[in-house]
Amino acid sequence: MATDDEVDRDPLFRYDEPIFADEDLLRISHLPGPNRIVGRDEHMQKVAEALNPAVFGQEPTHLFIFGKTGTGKSLISRSVSERVKEEARREDVRVQSAFIDCGEQTTEASVIKTIGRELNDQSETGLTVPQRGLGTGDYYDRLWTIIDACTDVAIVILDEIDMLEDDEVLRKLSRAGENRRITDSTVGIIGISNKIDFPDELNERVKSSFAHDELVFPPYDAQQLVDILEHRADAFRDGVLSDDAIPLTAALAAQEHGDARKAIDILRNAGRIATKEDAGEVTEDHVYAAKEKTEADRFGELIEGAPTQAKAILLALTVLTENKHQDQFPTKQIYEQYQSIARKLDMDSLSERRVQEILREQDFLNVIDSETKGRGRGRGVHTKHRLLEDPEIVKKVLHRDSRIADLGV
Ligand SMILES: Nc1ncnc2c1ncn2[C@@H]1O[C@H](COP(=O)(O)OP(=O)(O)O)[C@@H](O)[C@H]1O
Ligand SMILES: [Mg+2]
Protein backbone atom coordinates (compact mmCIF):
# COMPACT_ATOMS: atom_id res chain seq x y z
CA MET A 1 0.00 0.00 0.00
CA ALA A 2 1.64 3.25 -1.12
CA THR A 3 1.39 6.19 1.23
CA ASP A 4 1.63 9.77 -0.02
CA ASP A 5 5.27 9.85 1.04
CA GLU A 6 6.24 6.89 -1.06
CA VAL A 7 4.65 8.24 -4.19
CA ASP A 8 7.37 10.87 -4.53
CA ARG A 9 10.22 8.46 -4.01
CA ASP A 10 12.82 7.70 -6.63
CA PRO A 11 11.92 4.29 -8.07
CA LEU A 12 15.60 3.55 -8.63
CA PHE A 13 15.92 2.59 -4.97
CA ARG A 14 14.05 0.30 -2.68
CA TYR A 15 12.50 1.52 0.55
CA ASP A 16 11.06 -1.59 2.05
CA GLU A 17 13.00 -4.23 3.95
CA PRO A 18 10.86 -7.35 3.70
CA ILE A 19 13.56 -9.68 5.02
CA PHE A 20 15.85 -7.85 7.44
CA ALA A 21 14.76 -6.16 10.64
CA ASP A 22 18.32 -5.13 11.58
CA GLU A 23 20.97 -6.36 9.19
CA ASP A 24 23.72 -4.70 11.24
CA LEU A 25 23.50 -7.52 13.77
CA LEU A 26 25.08 -9.70 11.10
CA ARG A 27 28.02 -7.44 10.35
CA ILE A 28 31.20 -9.32 11.23
CA SER A 29 32.64 -6.28 13.02
CA HIS A 30 29.48 -5.78 15.09
CA LEU A 31 30.24 -6.38 18.77
CA PRO A 32 27.32 -8.37 20.17
CA GLY A 33 26.28 -7.86 23.77
CA PRO A 34 27.19 -10.55 26.34
CA ASN A 35 23.72 -12.12 26.10
CA ARG A 36 24.30 -12.89 22.43
CA ILE A 37 27.62 -14.63 22.98
CA VAL A 38 27.11 -18.35 23.36
CA GLY A 39 29.29 -21.41 23.82
CA ARG A 40 32.43 -19.67 25.03
CA ASP A 41 31.84 -19.34 28.78
CA GLU A 42 34.98 -21.20 29.72
CA HIS A 43 37.16 -19.22 27.36
CA MET A 44 35.64 -15.95 28.48
CA GLN A 45 36.39 -16.92 32.05
CA LYS A 46 40.03 -17.60 31.22
CA VAL A 47 40.44 -14.30 29.42
CA ALA A 48 38.77 -12.60 32.38
CA GLU A 49 41.20 -14.28 34.78
CA ALA A 50 44.17 -12.96 32.82
CA LEU A 51 42.75 -9.43 32.73
CA ASN A 52 41.29 -9.47 36.24
CA PRO A 53 44.16 -7.60 37.95
CA ALA A 54 43.40 -4.63 35.69
CA VAL A 55 40.16 -4.04 37.59
CA PHE A 56 42.31 -3.01 40.53
CA GLY A 57 44.93 -1.16 38.51
CA GLN A 58 47.39 -4.05 38.62
CA GLU A 59 49.30 -5.59 35.77
CA PRO A 60 47.28 -8.18 33.81
CA THR A 61 48.79 -11.48 32.70
CA HIS A 62 49.80 -11.35 29.06
CA LEU A 63 47.77 -13.78 27.01
CA PHE A 64 48.13 -15.47 23.65
CA ILE A 65 45.07 -16.88 21.93
CA PHE A 66 45.25 -19.35 19.07
CA GLY A 67 42.58 -20.91 16.94
CA LYS A 68 41.24 -21.12 13.41
CA THR A 69 39.27 -18.30 11.82
CA GLY A 70 35.80 -17.64 13.14
CA THR A 71 36.27 -19.31 16.52
CA GLY A 72 35.50 -16.13 18.43
CA LYS A 73 39.02 -15.01 19.33
CA SER A 74 38.61 -11.37 18.38
CA LEU A 75 35.09 -11.22 19.74
CA ILE A 76 35.91 -12.65 23.15
CA SER A 77 39.01 -10.46 23.51
CA ARG A 78 37.07 -7.32 22.70
CA SER A 79 34.06 -8.25 24.74
CA VAL A 80 35.98 -9.14 27.89
CA SER A 81 38.14 -6.01 27.55
CA GLU A 82 35.01 -3.88 27.44
CA ARG A 83 33.68 -5.58 30.55
CA VAL A 84 36.98 -5.06 32.36
CA LYS A 85 36.86 -1.35 31.53
CA GLU A 86 33.35 -1.10 32.89
CA GLU A 87 34.17 -2.97 36.08
CA ALA A 88 37.37 -0.97 36.64
CA ARG A 89 35.42 2.26 36.31
CA ARG A 90 33.52 1.32 39.47
CA GLU A 91 36.83 1.04 41.27
CA ASP A 92 37.90 4.38 39.86
CA VAL A 93 40.56 2.67 37.84
CA ARG A 94 41.07 3.76 34.27
CA VAL A 95 41.47 0.86 31.89
CA GLN A 96 41.74 1.62 28.18
CA SER A 97 42.16 -0.76 25.31
CA ALA A 98 43.61 -0.58 21.83
CA PHE A 99 42.67 -3.14 19.21
CA ILE A 100 45.29 -3.48 16.49
CA ASP A 101 44.78 -5.46 13.32
CA CYS A 102 48.34 -6.53 12.56
CA GLY A 103 47.24 -7.63 9.09
CA GLU A 104 46.87 -3.92 8.35
CA GLN A 105 49.47 -2.48 10.67
CA THR A 106 52.38 -4.75 9.92
CA THR A 107 55.33 -2.59 10.91
CA GLU A 108 56.60 -1.63 14.32
CA ALA A 109 56.09 2.09 13.68
CA SER A 110 52.52 1.72 12.43
CA VAL A 111 51.54 -0.47 15.38
CA ILE A 112 52.97 1.99 17.89
CA LYS A 113 51.34 4.91 16.11
CA THR A 114 47.95 3.20 16.04
CA ILE A 115 48.06 2.28 19.73
CA GLY A 116 49.03 5.87 20.51
CA ARG A 117 46.16 7.28 18.50
CA GLU A 118 43.64 4.94 20.07
CA LEU A 119 44.68 5.66 23.64
CA ASN A 120 45.41 9.35 23.35
CA ASP A 121 43.20 11.97 24.92
CA GLN A 122 44.67 15.15 23.57
CA SER A 123 43.04 17.34 26.19
CA GLU A 124 45.01 15.46 28.81
CA THR A 125 48.33 14.95 27.10
CA GLY A 126 48.50 18.01 24.89
CA LEU A 127 50.03 15.61 22.36
CA THR A 128 49.03 14.56 18.90
CA VAL A 129 50.14 11.43 17.14
CA PRO A 130 50.69 12.52 13.55
CA GLN A 131 50.11 10.01 10.72
CA ARG A 132 53.63 10.57 9.50
CA GLY A 133 56.74 12.57 10.13
CA LEU A 134 58.05 11.09 13.36
CA GLY A 135 60.73 8.47 13.77
CA THR A 136 59.88 5.20 15.48
CA GLY A 137 61.65 6.33 18.66
CA ASP A 138 59.56 9.49 18.84
CA TYR A 139 56.36 7.52 18.38
CA TYR A 140 57.41 5.31 21.28
CA ASP A 141 58.12 8.33 23.47
CA ARG A 142 54.67 9.72 22.76
CA LEU A 143 53.06 6.36 23.40
CA TRP A 144 54.66 6.04 26.83
CA THR A 145 53.56 9.55 27.75
CA ILE A 146 50.03 8.81 26.56
CA ILE A 147 49.82 5.53 28.47
CA ASP A 148 51.01 7.19 31.67
CA ALA A 149 48.66 10.14 31.30
CA CYS A 150 45.51 8.49 29.96
CA THR A 151 45.39 5.08 31.58
CA ASP A 152 46.05 3.13 34.73
CA VAL A 153 46.11 -0.05 32.71
CA ALA A 154 46.38 -0.25 28.92
CA ILE A 155 45.17 -3.46 27.29
CA VAL A 156 46.74 -3.88 23.89
CA ILE A 157 45.08 -6.45 21.66
CA LEU A 158 47.33 -7.46 18.78
CA ASP A 159 45.05 -9.35 16.42
CA GLU A 160 46.58 -11.56 13.71
CA ILE A 161 49.88 -11.10 15.46
CA ASP A 162 51.63 -13.57 13.13
CA MET A 163 51.42 -10.92 10.42
CA LEU A 164 53.69 -8.59 12.39
CA GLU A 165 56.92 -8.10 10.54
CA ASP A 166 58.88 -7.40 13.62
CA ASP A 167 58.59 -8.65 17.21
CA GLU A 168 60.40 -5.66 18.64
CA VAL A 169 57.10 -3.98 19.44
CA LEU A 170 56.04 -6.98 21.52
CA ARG A 171 59.26 -6.94 23.43
CA LYS A 172 59.12 -3.22 24.08
CA LEU A 173 55.48 -3.24 25.16
CA SER A 174 55.95 -6.16 27.51
CA ARG A 175 58.98 -4.57 29.12
CA ALA A 176 57.75 -1.00 29.24
CA GLY A 177 57.15 -1.13 32.99
CA GLU A 178 60.34 -2.99 33.81
CA ASN A 179 62.39 -0.52 31.82
CA ARG A 180 60.65 2.39 33.49
CA ARG A 181 59.36 3.68 30.16
CA ILE A 182 56.06 4.04 31.91
CA THR A 183 55.87 4.68 35.62
CA ASP A 184 52.25 5.28 36.62
CA SER A 185 50.59 2.66 34.46
CA THR A 186 50.91 -0.87 33.26
CA VAL A 187 50.35 -2.73 30.00
CA GLY A 188 48.63 -6.06 29.33
CA ILE A 189 48.99 -7.70 25.95
CA ILE A 190 46.57 -10.06 24.24
CA GLY A 191 48.13 -11.58 21.12
CA ILE A 192 45.81 -13.42 18.74
CA SER A 193 46.71 -15.74 15.90
CA ASN A 194 44.71 -17.83 13.42
CA LYS A 195 47.71 -20.06 12.96
CA ILE A 196 47.34 -23.16 15.03
CA ASP A 197 51.05 -23.90 14.91
CA PHE A 198 52.00 -20.36 15.75
CA PRO A 199 52.94 -21.15 19.38
CA ASP A 200 56.02 -23.00 18.09
CA GLU A 201 57.01 -20.12 15.91
CA LEU A 202 56.30 -17.70 18.70
CA ASN A 203 58.40 -19.77 21.06
CA GLU A 204 61.40 -19.16 18.93
CA ARG A 205 60.55 -15.55 18.39
CA VAL A 206 59.57 -14.13 21.76
CA LYS A 207 58.56 -16.61 24.36
CA SER A 208 61.73 -16.40 26.38
CA SER A 209 61.34 -12.67 26.66
CA PHE A 210 58.15 -12.55 28.71
CA ALA A 211 55.73 -14.65 30.67
CA HIS A 212 52.24 -15.23 29.31
CA ASP A 213 49.32 -17.62 29.36
CA GLU A 214 48.10 -19.44 26.28
CA LEU A 215 44.58 -20.30 25.29
CA VAL A 216 43.32 -22.34 22.34
CA PHE A 217 39.89 -21.74 20.79
CA PRO A 218 38.58 -24.90 19.13
CA PRO A 219 36.19 -24.76 16.16
CA TYR A 220 32.48 -24.73 16.97
CA ASP A 221 30.32 -27.77 16.35
CA ALA A 222 27.17 -27.47 14.26
CA GLN A 223 24.94 -27.18 17.34
CA GLN A 224 27.00 -24.30 18.74
CA LEU A 225 26.73 -22.55 15.38
CA VAL A 226 22.95 -23.03 15.51
CA ASP A 227 22.94 -21.36 18.94
CA ILE A 228 25.08 -18.47 17.74
CA LEU A 229 22.82 -17.88 14.74
CA GLU A 230 19.63 -18.18 16.77
CA HIS A 231 20.91 -15.46 19.06
CA ARG A 232 21.13 -13.18 16.01
CA ALA A 233 17.89 -14.29 14.38
CA ASP A 234 16.25 -10.97 15.30
CA ALA A 235 18.33 -9.50 12.48
CA PHE A 236 15.44 -10.88 10.42
CA ARG A 237 11.79 -9.98 10.45
CA ASP A 238 9.55 -12.36 12.32
CA GLY A 239 8.74 -15.51 10.41
CA VAL A 240 10.90 -14.91 7.31
CA LEU A 241 13.49 -17.55 8.22
CA SER A 242 12.30 -20.96 7.08
CA ASP A 243 12.76 -23.70 9.66
CA ASP A 244 15.70 -25.13 7.75
CA ALA A 245 17.61 -21.90 7.20
CA ILE A 246 19.62 -21.82 10.43
CA PRO A 247 20.34 -25.55 10.79
CA LEU A 248 21.41 -25.78 7.16
CA THR A 249 23.62 -22.69 7.45
CA ALA A 250 25.25 -24.15 10.55
CA ALA A 251 25.80 -27.52 8.91
CA LEU A 252 27.38 -25.94 5.82
CA ALA A 253 29.59 -23.67 7.92
CA ALA A 254 30.72 -26.62 10.03
CA GLN A 255 31.85 -28.66 7.03
CA GLU A 256 35.45 -27.52 6.94
CA HIS A 257 35.82 -26.35 10.50
CA GLY A 258 33.13 -24.77 12.66
CA ASP A 259 33.59 -21.16 11.61
CA ALA A 260 31.13 -18.65 13.09
CA ARG A 261 32.26 -15.94 10.69
CA LYS A 262 31.34 -18.12 7.77
CA ALA A 263 28.02 -19.09 9.35
CA ILE A 264 27.06 -15.46 9.92
CA ASP A 265 28.18 -14.45 6.43
CA ILE A 266 26.17 -17.23 4.85
CA LEU A 267 23.03 -16.33 6.75
CA ARG A 268 23.41 -12.66 5.89
CA ASN A 269 24.01 -13.43 2.22
CA ALA A 270 20.99 -15.75 2.20
CA GLY A 271 18.91 -12.83 3.47
CA ARG A 272 20.31 -10.55 0.82
CA ILE A 273 19.64 -13.03 -1.96
CA ALA A 274 16.07 -13.49 -0.70
CA THR A 275 15.66 -9.70 -0.63
CA LYS A 276 16.94 -9.36 -4.17
CA GLU A 277 14.54 -12.06 -5.36
CA ASP A 278 11.65 -10.40 -3.56
CA ALA A 279 11.06 -13.70 -1.82
CA GLY A 280 8.90 -13.74 1.27
CA GLU A 281 11.05 -16.28 3.01
CA VAL A 282 14.71 -17.31 3.33
CA THR A 283 14.74 -20.84 1.96
CA GLU A 284 17.23 -23.70 1.69
CA ASP A 285 18.02 -22.67 -1.87
CA HIS A 286 18.93 -19.20 -0.70
CA VAL A 287 21.26 -20.71 1.86
CA TYR A 288 23.01 -22.91 -0.71
CA ALA A 289 23.42 -19.97 -3.08
CA ALA A 290 24.71 -17.89 -0.17
CA LYS A 291 27.31 -20.50 0.69
CA GLU A 292 28.71 -20.33 -2.84
CA LYS A 293 28.78 -16.57 -2.77
CA THR A 294 30.34 -16.44 0.68
CA GLU A 295 33.13 -18.79 -0.32
CA ALA A 296 33.84 -16.97 -3.54
CA ASP A 297 33.87 -13.61 -1.71
CA ARG A 298 36.09 -14.84 1.07
CA PHE A 299 38.46 -16.39 -1.38
CA GLY A 300 38.34 -13.35 -3.65
CA GLU A 301 39.36 -11.16 -0.73
CA LEU A 302 42.24 -13.42 0.10
CA ILE A 303 43.76 -13.40 -3.34
CA GLU A 304 42.58 -10.02 -4.55
CA GLY A 305 45.59 -7.91 -5.27
CA ALA A 306 47.91 -10.91 -5.21
CA PRO A 307 50.45 -10.60 -8.01
CA THR A 308 49.71 -12.53 -11.21
CA GLN A 309 52.65 -14.80 -10.40
CA ALA A 310 50.96 -15.94 -7.18
CA LYS A 311 47.73 -16.49 -9.07
CA ALA A 312 49.54 -18.56 -11.68
CA ILE A 313 50.96 -20.77 -8.94
CA LEU A 314 47.53 -21.18 -7.42
CA LEU A 315 46.12 -22.01 -10.84
CA ALA A 316 48.77 -24.71 -11.19
CA LEU A 317 47.63 -26.34 -7.96
CA THR A 318 43.99 -25.96 -9.02
CA VAL A 319 44.56 -27.62 -12.38
CA LEU A 320 46.39 -30.50 -10.70
CA THR A 321 43.61 -30.91 -8.14
CA GLU A 322 41.03 -31.08 -10.93
CA ASN A 323 42.90 -33.53 -13.11
CA LYS A 324 44.45 -35.97 -10.69
CA HIS A 325 42.76 -38.27 -8.25
CA GLN A 326 44.51 -36.88 -5.23
CA ASP A 327 44.48 -33.61 -3.38
CA GLN A 328 48.04 -33.13 -2.13
CA PHE A 329 50.91 -32.24 -4.41
CA PRO A 330 54.62 -31.82 -3.82
CA THR A 331 56.22 -28.48 -4.62
CA LYS A 332 58.10 -29.95 -7.57
CA GLN A 333 54.95 -31.09 -9.35
CA ILE A 334 53.22 -27.76 -8.79
CA TYR A 335 56.33 -26.02 -10.03
CA GLU A 336 56.33 -27.93 -13.32
CA GLN A 337 52.66 -27.15 -13.90
CA TYR A 338 53.31 -23.52 -13.00
CA GLN A 339 56.16 -23.26 -15.53
CA SER A 340 53.87 -24.35 -18.32
CA ILE A 341 51.25 -21.81 -17.24
CA ALA A 342 53.87 -19.07 -16.99
CA ARG A 343 55.00 -19.85 -20.54
CA LYS A 344 51.44 -19.56 -21.83
CA LEU A 345 51.03 -16.29 -19.96
CA ASP A 346 54.23 -15.07 -21.54
CA MET A 347 55.54 -14.37 -18.11
CA ASP A 348 59.00 -14.82 -16.61
CA SER A 349 59.23 -18.02 -14.67
CA LEU A 350 60.19 -17.69 -11.02
CA SER A 351 62.71 -20.04 -9.41
CA GLU A 352 61.43 -23.16 -7.69
CA ARG A 353 62.66 -21.76 -4.42
CA ARG A 354 60.64 -18.57 -4.86
CA VAL A 355 57.57 -20.60 -5.82
CA GLN A 356 58.01 -22.59 -2.64
CA GLU A 357 58.12 -19.33 -0.68
CA ILE A 358 54.95 -18.07 -2.31
CA LEU A 359 53.21 -21.37 -1.59
CA ARG A 360 54.16 -20.89 2.04
CA GLU A 361 52.71 -17.38 1.91
CA GLN A 362 49.47 -18.71 0.49
CA ASP A 363 49.45 -21.24 3.30
CA PHE A 364 49.67 -18.24 5.56
CA LEU A 365 46.56 -16.78 3.99
CA ASN A 366 44.65 -20.01 4.55
CA VAL A 367 44.15 -20.43 0.83
CA ILE A 368 46.07 -23.66 0.79
CA ASP A 369 47.38 -25.98 3.41
CA SER A 370 51.04 -26.96 3.29
CA GLU A 371 52.40 -29.85 5.21
CA THR A 372 56.06 -30.67 5.68
CA LYS A 373 57.14 -34.17 6.60
CA GLY A 374 60.54 -35.02 8.04
CA ARG A 375 63.36 -32.46 8.03
CA GLY A 376 62.86 -28.84 9.08
CA ARG A 377 59.97 -26.61 8.10
CA GLY A 378 59.92 -24.94 4.76
CA ARG A 379 62.18 -27.49 3.03
CA GLY A 380 60.68 -27.66 -0.43
CA VAL A 381 61.29 -31.31 -1.29
CA HIS A 382 59.26 -32.63 1.58
CA THR A 383 56.39 -30.20 1.47
CA LYS A 384 53.00 -31.10 0.03
CA HIS A 385 50.27 -28.61 -0.71
CA ARG A 386 46.53 -28.95 -0.73
CA LEU A 387 43.91 -26.54 -1.99
CA LEU A 388 41.43 -25.67 0.76
CA GLU A 389 38.67 -24.43 -1.50
CA ASP A 390 36.60 -26.13 -4.15
CA PRO A 391 38.64 -25.88 -7.41
CA GLU A 392 35.55 -24.58 -9.23
CA ILE A 393 35.36 -21.61 -6.90
CA VAL A 394 39.09 -20.99 -7.04
CA LYS A 395 38.96 -20.87 -10.82
CA LYS A 396 35.99 -18.56 -10.85
CA VAL A 397 37.90 -16.13 -8.68
CA LEU A 398 41.17 -16.48 -10.58
CA HIS A 399 39.29 -15.74 -13.80
CA ARG A 400 38.56 -12.27 -12.50
CA ASP A 401 42.13 -11.62 -13.61
CA SER A 402 41.69 -11.12 -17.34
CA ARG A 403 45.11 -12.54 -18.23
CA ILE A 404 44.22 -15.78 -16.50
CA ALA A 405 40.70 -15.86 -17.94
CA ASP A 406 42.22 -15.58 -21.43
CA LEU A 407 44.14 -18.80 -20.86
CA GLY A 408 40.90 -20.71 -21.07
CA VAL A 409 41.82 -23.36 -18.50
N1 LIG B 1 30.55 -17.59 20.69
C1 LIG B 1 30.02 -16.69 19.85
N2 LIG B 1 28.80 -16.16 20.07
C2 LIG B 1 28.28 -15.26 19.22
N3 LIG B 1 28.90 -14.81 18.12
C3 LIG B 1 30.13 -15.30 17.84
C4 LIG B 1 30.75 -16.26 18.69
N4 LIG B 1 31.97 -16.56 18.18
C5 LIG B 1 32.10 -15.83 17.06
N5 LIG B 1 31.01 -15.07 16.85
C6 LIG B 1 30.82 -14.14 15.74
O1 LIG B 1 31.43 -14.71 14.59
C7 LIG B 1 32.22 -13.78 13.87
C8 LIG B 1 33.65 -14.25 13.85
O2 LIG B 1 34.19 -14.22 15.17
P1 LIG B 1 35.65 -13.66 15.45
O3 LIG B 1 35.76 -13.32 16.87
O4 LIG B 1 35.96 -12.55 14.49
O5 LIG B 1 36.53 -14.94 15.10
P2 LIG B 1 38.11 -15.04 15.03
O6 LIG B 1 38.70 -13.79 15.57
O7 LIG B 1 38.43 -16.25 15.82
O8 LIG B 1 38.42 -15.23 13.56
C9 LIG B 1 32.04 -12.45 14.57
O9 LIG B 1 31.08 -11.70 13.88
C10 LIG B 1 31.56 -12.83 15.96
O10 LIG B 1 30.70 -11.83 16.46
MG1 LIG C 1 39.84 -12.46 14.45
Image: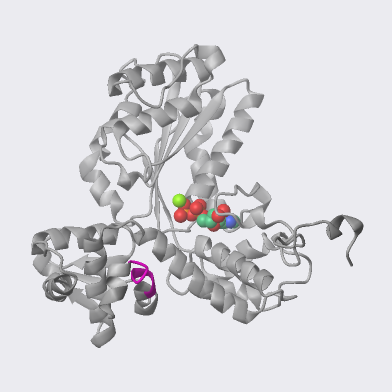
Q: Relative to 253, is 353 on the left or the right?
A: left
Q: Relative to 354, is 207 on the left or the right?
A: right
Q: Quadrant of residue 40?
A: bottom right
- Residue 63 visible in this rendered orientation of the protein: yes
In the rendered view of the protein, which quadrant contains the N terminus? bottom right
Residue 117 versus residue 16: which sits nearer the camera? 16
Q: Relative to 279, is 351 on the left or the right?
A: left
Q: Quadrant of residue 391?
A: bottom left
Residue 267 versus residue 41: which sits nearer the camera? 267
Q: Residue at x 24, y 66 (%)?
A: 370
Q: Tell me if residue 73 comes above or below residue 61 in the rendering.
A: below
Magenta-colored stretch includes residue 236 = no
Q: Relative to 108, is 92 on the left or the right?
A: right
Estimate the x, y position of residue 364 in percent, counting from the top left: 29, 57
Estimate the x, y position of residue 10 in percent, counting from the top left: 75, 58
Q: How is the image coloured?
A: one colour
Q: Quadrant of residue 55?
A: top right
Span shown in magenta: 396-401
Residue 348 versus residue 192: which sits nearer the camera? 348
- Residue 72 visible in this rendered orientation of the protein: no
Magenta-colored stretch includes residue 400 = yes
Q: Tell me if residue 141 comes above or below residue 319 in the rendering.
A: above
Estimate the x, y position of residue 200 in percent, counting from the top left: 25, 51
